[in-house]
Image (cartoon, rainbow, N blue to C red):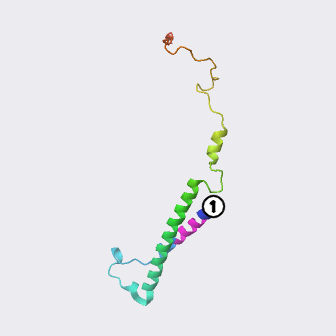
Amino acid sequence: MLFLIILLIIICVALAIFVLIQNPKGGGLAAGSSASNMFGVQRTGDVLEKGTWILLAVVVVITLSITTIAKTGNGGSTGESKIQEQLNRTPAPSPIGNAPASTTPAPANNNAAPAETPAQPAQ
């Protein structure tokens, strides 16, 4: 999976270079300029455009394959992330903060009314 990520980064850099070196196709501020069709520049533009589409397709395929590998867990790991493994090793905190968990048994009679606790005086 690491190989695919490195390959994806290299292809993305190549795609950015392909896009940046292309001549504009008219429109915008470049309208009215016919210099791009002189001296075979049009043929170079076609090659760059086809290369851009091919690199774009490769980026999509590699991205989908990385996602599939990561979701199925076949990326050379045990299937759990390191964060999840750390959480599994950490003991669960007690429900009342630092106080130890109570070991008093629950009342046997579920129909009995709960005992009322006296109100605490305001301090």
User: Which residue corresponds to the image point at 58% horizontal and 58% vertical from the top-left?
Assistant: 69
Magenta segment: does it hold 24? no
For this rendering, which residue is in front, 72 or 24? 72
User: Which residue corresponds to the image point at 60% horizontal and 64% vertical from the top-left?
Assistant: 4
| Residue underneath mark 1 | 2
Label 1: few (<14), some (14–19) or many (≥20) C-alpha neighbours in 10 Å: few
> On the rendered structure, is 30 left or right of 111?
left
User: Which residue corresponds to the image point at 66% horizontal and 37% vertical from the top-left?
Assistant: 90
For this rendering, which residue is in front, 104 or 118? 104
Query: Vertically, is 91 above or below 1?
Result: above
For badge 1, the amino acid type reads Leu
Residue 96 is situated, as x and y percent measured from the top left of the image, at: 58, 24
Total marks placed: 1
Residue 118 is situated, as x and y percent measured from the top left of the image, at: 50, 9
Residue 29 is situated, as x and y percent measured from the top left of the image, at: 34, 75
Q: Which residues are magenta?
A: 6-14
Query: Vertically, is 111 above or below 50?
Result: above
The image quarter containing residue 41 is: bottom left
